[in-house]
Amino acid sequence: MTAAHHTPAIVGSTGSPQPLATRQLLWASEEDTARFAAQLAQQPQLHDAYLTLHGDLGAGKTTLVRHLLRALGVQGRIKSPTYAVVEPHEVPGLAIWHFDFYRLEDPREWEDAGFRDIFASPGLKLAEWPEKAAALTPPADIAIHIEAIDETQRSVMLAAHTPAGRDMLATWPA
């Protein structure tokens, strides 16, 4: 995947209305979340992907990101970007940006922070609360919708919105 994958006009992007492919999962425990993250980390297309994480507060979005970053080799403390909006991470051969758009209020914040440049560059982009920046971002390769069933179980729907996302879901382990 090349950097051109994420270089279409960002302002005004609305994303794909219908996913190209979907997959439904059930995580019975946080261990299932960690296993999913480990499988996701093995996807070669992930290194230049944009993943969005959807769900209510406490659904497990940040937990999934932390497991994924660990599976990719990120060491040290992994902070939530709730106040900073973005936390950069790097492992050999891979730049990673973890966004939390919950507090994004004005499109000028997007421009002022240089997010357009980040999305135009290669690397993995992970976004919590992506609906707050939906008009500014490209379509997600995979949108991950997490719904808490109870304290431990999560219903998860993966929706591919790009050919790269569809390819990742097509090669996903059973």
Image: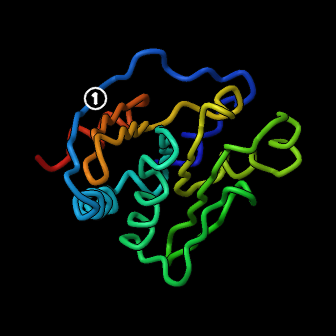
Left or right: 171, with 43 as reference point: left
In the image shown, does 88 or 91 lie closer to the viewer? 88
Residue 127 vertical position relative to residue 9 in the rendered view, above or below: below
- Quadrant for residue 23, please give it: top left
Q: How is the image coloured?
A: rainbow
Picture residue at 72% right of the left edge, 54% below the top: 85
Expressed as whole percent of the image width and height from the top left, the position of residue 92 reads 50, 78
Residue 10 vertical position relative to residue 25 in the rendered view, above or below: above
Neighbour class for label 1 at 10 Å: few (<14), some, many (≥20)? some
Task: Tell me the kind of residue under disc 1.
Answer: Thr
Residue 81 vertical position relative to residue 117 in the rendered view, above or below: below
Expressed as whole percent of the image width and height from the top left, the position of residue 51 reads 48, 44
Q: How many marks?
A: 1
Picture residue at 40% right of the left edge, 40% below the top: 144
- Quadrant for residue 90, please give it: bottom right
- View extreme (left): residue: 174
- View extreme (bottom): residue: 76
Expressed as whole percent of the image width and height from the top left, the position of residue 86 reads 69, 58
Expressed as whole percent of the image width and height from the top left, the position of residue 101 reads 67, 44
- View extreme (top): residue: 17
- Quadrant for residue 143, please give it: top left
Q: Which residue is mark 1?
A: 22
Picture residue at 42% right of the left edge, 77% below the top: 73
Instruction: Find numbered disc 1 in the image and state the secondary structure of the residue it sits on.
Output: strand
